[in-house]
Image (cartoon, rainbow, N blue to C red):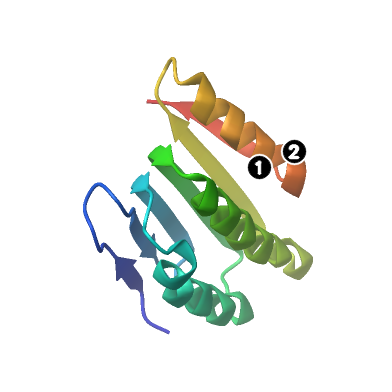
């Protein structure tokens, strides 16, 4: 399995870095025109990754803006990654946010609550 890096449209789509060593990063803005199409390769990679994931996986979200359709996509991504915990994998989710960006923190807390995953909220 190879690492996967996607950066399509600056300021509209995030940079996505997926590594087979278990480091996953999604940074920037997420407002692609068609999120399901944009993230399709990412879903395929994650499905393959889950089959042979390492014992520790770190997921970091460092997003400035997320549109409503991207929220749904991230929920699906996190649901897929949550299955790793059934394989005795240690899954860490880091949610980076600006100091006074309450909207970002609230969005992270919604993911945390809805998916029953523990997030690390990191002020930048």
Where, by quadrant of the figure, is residue 19 drawn? bottom left
Give residue 59's position: percent from left, percent from top.
51, 52
Q: Secondary structure at mark 2?
A: helix
Give left or right: position of 69 versus 109. left
Q: Residues within 10 Å of mark 2 (few under 14, many from 20)?
A: few
- 2 and 1 marks in contact (CB < 8 Å): yes
Q: Quadrant of the C terminus?
A: top left
Against 88, is 45 above or below?
below
Give residue 11's position: percent from left, percent from top.
25, 46
Comparing 40 with 97, the one in front is 40
**Residue found at the very far left of the displayed protein:** 10
Residue at point 57%, 73% (across, down): 53
Q: Which residue is mark 1?
A: 111
Question: Residue 83's mark?
Answer: none
Residue at point 37%, 81% (across, down): 2
Q: How many angstroms separate mark 2 from mark 1 (CA)?
A: 6 Å
Residue at point 62%, 57% (across, down): 78
Give residue 30's position: percent from left, percent from top.
39, 49
Q: Residues within 10 Å of mark 1 (few under 14, many from 20)?
A: some
Q: Quadrant of the N terminus?
A: bottom left
Residue at point 62%, 54% (across, down): 75
Question: Residue 113's mark?
Answer: 2
Against 96, is 76 above or below?
below
Q: Secondary structure at mark 1?
A: helix
**Residue found at the very far front of the displayed protein:** 33
Give left or right: position of 5 versus 90. left
Where, by quadrant of the figure, is residue 47 drawn? bottom right
Give residue 31's position: percent from left, percent from top.
38, 50
Comparing 36 with 41, the one in front is 36
């Amino acid at each position: 399995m190879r690492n996967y890096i996607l950066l399509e449209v600056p300021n509209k789509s995030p940079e996505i870095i997926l590594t087979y060593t278990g480091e996953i990063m999604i940074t920037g803005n997420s407002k692609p025109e068609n999120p399901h199409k944009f993230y399709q390769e990412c879903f395929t990679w994650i499905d393959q990754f889950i089959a042979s994931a390492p014992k520790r996986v770190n997921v970091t979200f460092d997003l400035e803006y997320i549109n409503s359709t991207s929220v749904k996509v991230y929920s699906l991504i996190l649901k897929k990654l949550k299955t790793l915990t059934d394989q005795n994998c240690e899954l860490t989710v880091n949610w980076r946010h600006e100091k006074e960006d309450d909207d970002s923190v609230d969005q992270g807390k919604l993911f945390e609550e809805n998916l029953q995953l523990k997030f690390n909220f990191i002020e930048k």
